[in-house]
Image (cartoon, coloured by chain):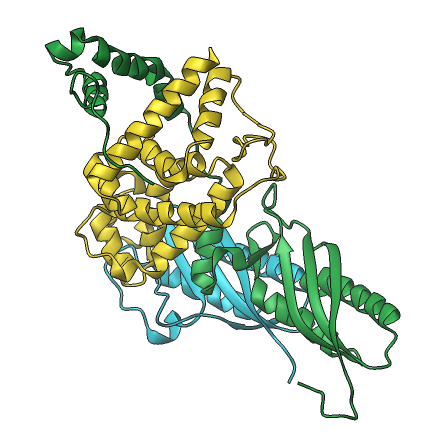
């Protein structure tokens, strides 16, 4: 440990380190490189940066907060374990979106709820996926709740494309990278999703 | 059955394009006037504000997600392999399961096969109760009802005292029986 | 007139490891040489070579300004009261960090291994 004591007569050594707030943030690629070397803290910083976006996608695609939390956890640890395979040919965010989307797809295939899922977290719980399930919308906005229900009724691949485009604002090329579907397929799914949702909301009024 | 191409509108335009143009504010003269294009635009308008509201909804993961991921990283486990013992304290699930199997093995007449500990996501940081499901094999002649009851008691006691997690329930499933005298031990 | 004390991640880790190891019931600290390095924040401290023996000591530590973030992974013997032990390690390591370095501690403890009798 290093200590500077002004009483010793030595001139006060100015802090060599900038205060935490003034330190420039490291870019993703630098953090990835360090994480690839095994630096847990760089990985933690990457996770902190990207987790909100990844969580949003998981919640909207899965329709259930607790499932989304599980998907996010598993996606983050997958990212840690295979961080060595990230080559930098796509953005790190794209790479992460792909991991979480794949997790969501796998989860949707495994669970096909025909009975309502028990809802543990009352506060802030989102809609439970699957028809006939009790809804727990945290927001009072009934119209938004109706859209959520309509979204939950879309086929998984349409819902995924829709969420990535409409809620995350991603371009067709990026969505194609993330889902592994061609841009044409992405356009088609997106269009079908939009039309179906518009139809449902037309009927809702 | 997936038809990936978007069917053209009656006027020949691509409905997906019309939608994207409506979104970007780049509708051309035809799209603005044509009645076929108009219905595609109407669909877009109907959803527009609503989608913006949905996109603006704050959705944040709880801090426990990252906690558990990093806890798993440093202990070289998967996040679902951590049991919460209390605030900022964790126990590896595989090792806890091995400990409970050991408890069963040390009782006469029983061998543990599988042990599965499940913990619901805790509401606040801290220990949430766990369910223990065990499959065991027993020696022929043993009073299954009483031995199962004893095992259940021992597992609860071990879980609560030694591991330090509240036990919500214990399921013991006797899967098979073995005989000391014959070569039936697997 | 204040004395400014600057603590490196490495020093923090040594403090934490020393105290954690001394808690009765802690069999050893658990680490994986390949997977874990001390998180050295090279952008504000000179890069210090991490001694091999510290890499495998099951402690990951970082200083953020006036806060100390520490993760300790331990192994215990069967029969140890795990929840109580983990809480004790957490409390004692926190206490040691606060007293020795003056930093505000955030300590997380994982029991990764319960060693069974042979």
Left or right, B106 with respect to A114, comes to: right
Q: Position of residue A114 (x, y in %)?
A: 58, 40
Q: Is residue A176 above or below residue A137?
A: below
Residue at 39% across / 51% down in the picture? A76
Q: Position of residue B184 (x, y in %)?
A: 72, 88
Could one spot residue A88 in this view of the protein? yes
Which of these two is toward me, A199 or C9? Answer: A199
User: Residue at image x 54%, y 55%?
Assistant: C95
Q: Chain C, which colour?
A: cyan
| Left or right for A138, reference B21 | right
State which chain is coloured green.
Answer: B
Image quarter in which the N terminus of chain B is found: top left
The front one of B112 and A47 is B112
Residue A151, percent from left and from top = 43, 29
In the rendered picture of this protein, how many numbered marks are placed on residues? 0
Q: Position of residue A148 (x, y in %)?
A: 46, 26
Query: In the displayed structure, would residue A105 be above or below residue C26?
Result: above
Farthest left residue in view? B29
Residue at the image position 74 percent from the left and 59 percent from the top: B170
Identify the colour of chain A in the image.
Answer: yellow
Residue A80 or C5: which is nearer the viewer?
A: A80
Is residue C7 visible from the viewing direction of this image? no
Residue at the far top: name it: B33
> In the drawing, does residue A94 fall left or right of residue C103?
left
Question: Where, quadrant-wise, is the C terminus of chain B in this rendering?
Answer: bottom right
Residue C101 vs residue B29: left or right? Answer: right
């Amino acid at each position: 440990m290093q200590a500077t004591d002004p009483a010793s007569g030595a001139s006060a050594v100015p802090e060599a380190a900038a205060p935490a707030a003034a330190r420039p943030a490291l870019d993703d690629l630098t953090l990835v490189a360090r994480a690839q070397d095994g630096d847990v803290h760089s990985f933690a910083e990457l996770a902190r940066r990207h987790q909100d976006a990844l969580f949003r996608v998981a919640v909207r695609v899965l329709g259930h907060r607790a499932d989304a939390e599980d998907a996010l956890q598993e996606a983050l640890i997958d990212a840690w374990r295979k961080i060595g395979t990230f080559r930098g040919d796509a953005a790190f965010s794209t790479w992460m979106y792909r991991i979480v989307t794949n997790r969501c797809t796998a989860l949707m295939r495994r669970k096909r709820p025909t009975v309502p899922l028990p809802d543990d977290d009352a506060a802030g719980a989102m809609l439970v996926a699957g028809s006939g399930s009790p809804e727990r919308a945290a927001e009072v906005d009934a119209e938004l709740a109706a859209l959520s229900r309509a979204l939950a009724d879309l086929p998984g691949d349409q819902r995924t494309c829709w969420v990535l485009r409409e809620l995350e604002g991603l371009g067709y090329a990026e969505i194609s990278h993330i889902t592994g579907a061609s841009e044409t397929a992405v356009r088609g799914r997106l269009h079908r999703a939009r039309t179906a949702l518009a139809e449902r909301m037309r009927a809702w009024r | 059955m997936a038809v990936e191409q978007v069917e053209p509108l009656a006027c020949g335009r691509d409905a997906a394009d019309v939608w994207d143009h409506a979104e970007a504010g780049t509708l051309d003269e035809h799209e603005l006037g044509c009645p076929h294009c108009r219905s595609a635009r109407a669909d877009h308008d109907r959803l527009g504000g609503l989608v913006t509201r949905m996109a603006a909804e704050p959705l944040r993961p709880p801090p426990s997600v990252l906690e558990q991921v990093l806890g798993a990283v440093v202990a070289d486990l998967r996040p679902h392999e951590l049991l919460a013992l209390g605030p900022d304290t964790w126990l590896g699930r595989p090792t806890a399961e091995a400990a409970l199997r050991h408890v069963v093995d040390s009782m006469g007449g029983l061998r543990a096969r599988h042990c599965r500990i499940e913990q619901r996501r805790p509401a606040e940081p801290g220990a949430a109760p766990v369910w223990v499901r065990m499959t065991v094999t027993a020696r022929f002649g043993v009073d299954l009802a009483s031995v199962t009851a004893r095992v259940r008691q021992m597992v609860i006691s071990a879980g609560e005292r030694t591991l330090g997690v509240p036990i919500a329930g214990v399921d013991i499933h006797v899967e098979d029986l073995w005989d000391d005298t014959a070569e039936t031990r697997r | 007139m204040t004395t400014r004390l600057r603590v490196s991640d490495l020093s923090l880790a040594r403090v934490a490891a020393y105290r954690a190891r001394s808690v009765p019931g802690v069999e050893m600290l658990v680490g994986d040489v390949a997977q874990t390095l001390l998180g050295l924040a090279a952008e504000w401290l000179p890069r210090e070579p991490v001694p091999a023996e510290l890499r495998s000591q099951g402690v990951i530590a970082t200083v953020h300004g006036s806060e100390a973030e520490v993760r300790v992974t331990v192994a215990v013997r069967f029969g140890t009261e795990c929840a109580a032990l983990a809480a004790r390690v957490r409390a004692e390591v926190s206490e040691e960090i606060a007293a020795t370095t003056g930093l505000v501690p955030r300590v997380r403890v994982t029991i990764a291994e319960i060693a069974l009798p042979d």
